[in-house]
Image: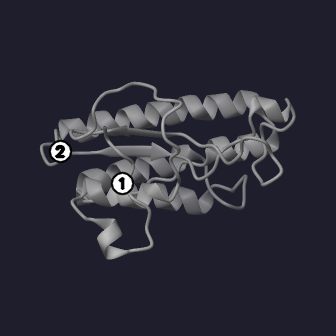
Amino acid sequence: PAIATINRLRREVPLRWPAGHFDAMMFPVALEWLTVATPRVMFIGLGETDEWAHEGDYARYLEAAHRADMYIAELWTTLQSMPEYRGTTTLIITTDHGRGSNEAGPREWNNHNTRTVGSHEMWVGMIGPEIPARGTISGGPTLHQAQIAASIARAVGVDWCKEEPRAEAPIPLK
């Protein structure tokens, strides 16, 4: 019933952006689905920070990033409270692209394209039973977005490189 109610709201609340809803309309559906369906793999796409950045609204960008942090914390707390997931779940958090860096200039932070300095760089956060706690890592080996699929597959016991020989190896855990 909660999913049906939220989906009704998603249909009826006007969109601000053609590509999607506010994260506050998406996250409750994902959280409810997690608790009722207990999926083995689940993808959640939070895109509100990207939309505010494209508009150049830094204050709302920061607000959306803060909400996303709260959603991630709630997701992890929920996962750890459920016997099906506690102690066995891996959470991989990343973006679909980078954002212009400070080197690009103060007006370029809201872009991402081949001409925007730093937009090819992105971050990834991973937490789970097989991932050692190492804090922030920088200056290590270059990682690629193409490694995310193999990393997700590894978390559910699948060797993605064996399934898809053209795939890149998963992100190293050591």
Q: Nearer the viewer, residue 167 or 126?
A: 167
Q: Name the secondary structure under disc 2.
A: loop
Q: Relative to 121, is 6 on the left or the right?
A: left
| Residue 126 placement (x, y as % from top left) | 37, 39
Q: Residues within 10 Å of mark 2 (few under 14, many from 20)?
A: some
Instruction: Give the farthest residue toward the left.
Output: 83
Question: Rounded to the nearest whole Å, what is the CA distance between mark 1 and mark 2?
Answer: 15 Å
> In the rendered view, would you say 50 is above or below 58?
below
Residue 51 is at least partly visible in this image: yes
> In the rendered view, would you say 54 is above or below 63?
below
Q: Relative to 72, is 57 on the left or the right?
A: right
Looking at the rendered structure, the kind of residue marked 2 is: Thr
Give the image quarter of residue 60: top right
Looking at the rendered structure, the kind of residue marked 1 is: Ser
Residue of label 2: 88
- Tell me whether circle 1 and circle 2 mark residues in contact (CB < 8 Å): no
Q: Relative to 64, is 26 on the left or the right?
A: left
Q: Nearer the viewer, residue 10 or 84?
A: 84
Q: Relative to 63, is 73 on the left or the right?
A: left
Residue 1 is at least partly visible in this image: no
Q: Nearer the viewer, residue 17 or 97?
A: 97
How many tags in the picture? Answer: 2
> In the rendered view, would you say 144 is above or below 63?
below
Residue of label 1: 151
| Residue 141 placement (x, y as % from top left) | 49, 41
Q: Residues within 10 Å of mark 1 (few under 14, many from 20)?
A: many
Q: Residue at x 21, y 60 (%)?
A: 157
Q: Name the secondary structure under disc 1.
A: helix
Q: Residue at x 63, y 45 (%)?
A: 48
> In the rendered view, would you say 11 is above or below 128?
below
